[in-house]
Image (cartoon, grey):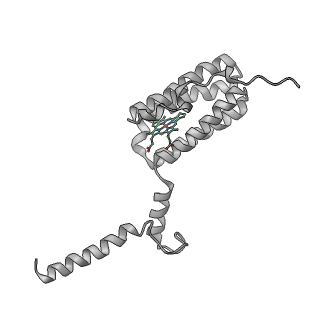
Amino acid sequence: MSPTRWIIALLVFALAVPATASLTKTADRHWLTGADEKTRLERLEHYLGGFSSAMLETGLRYGHVRQAVADENWLLADYHWKKIADAIENGLMKRPARRANAEAIFLEGPWKALDVAWAQDDTRAVEKALHSAHQACLNCHVAEKVAFINDQPLLRKTPKLEEKPKEKQP
Ligand code: HEC
């Protein structure tokens, strides 16, 4: 390689490396307000993550749904159920390739059925819809090739209404 080519190659390298590293590597604690607009938006996009942050929220809220079901607190269960749909929508905005399965397997069928069931205040209807919704979570993990997610306490068994702990006598 001629010396001029070496210099060009070095220059390209010197310019290219900081361009990617600058996304997270910064000495400025004002990592948003101190950055130019493009970097700022790229940092926000990076920080907000992909589908897994939406699923972390979904899993957390699903744990609350299970507890609310055990307590037969339908209003609380319904509250978290609606937030789960919001969380998944946010995830789909970030990872649109997952939309087809999310809608076909979960949102348009089992999610809606349970959303209606809470309002009916019918324990048997809730139990049935909850079973289908739980199965839909599992099915989407299989469809999206993350079946290993299903092997954990939160997802191994459908929540049971009988999980409600016996009240202690005063
Ligand atoms: C689009 C189909 C889809 C649906 C519907 C879905 N998931 Fe997921 N879930 C995924 C994918 C994909 C991942 C792995 C995300 C990643 O690594 O980017 C995941 C990951 C998870 C995780 C692990 C999150 C973490 O990073 O700690 C939990 C917990 C979870 N899902 C729970 C649920 C529950 C509960 C439901 C139903 C209420 C559900 N999921 C519905 C696709 C889905």
Q: How many marks?
A: 0
Q: Is residue 124 left or right of residue 142?
A: right
Indicate the quadrant containing the N terminus: top left, top right, bottom left or bottom right. bottom left
Indicate the quadrant containing the C terminus: top left, top right, bottom left or bottom right. top right
In the rendered view, tell whether residue 144 sits above or below residue 131.
below
Image x and y of residue 15, in percent: 31, 75
Whether residue 17 is visible to the viewer of this picture, yes or no, is: yes
Image quarter of residue 100 = top left
Question: Residue at 71% across / 24% down in the picture?
Answer: 164
In the rendered view, tell whether residue 10 sits above or below residue 155.
below
Image x and y of residue 60, in percent: 59, 40
Q: Residue furthest top?
A: 124
Relative depth, front residue between 106 and 4: 4
Q: Is residue 40 left or right of residue 79?
A: left
Q: Residue furthest right?
A: 170
Image quarter of residue 159 = top right
Whether residue 89 is visible to the viewer of this picture, yes or no, is: no
Question: Residue at 41% across / 70% down in the picture?
Answer: 22
In the rendered view, tell whether residue 69 sits above or below residue 99.
above
Image x and y of residue 104, in percent: 45, 30
Q: Is residue 144 left or right of residue 70?
A: left
Q: Residue furthest left?
A: 1
Question: Residue at 56% across / 38% down in the picture?
Answer: 59
Image x and y of residue 126, in percent: 64, 22
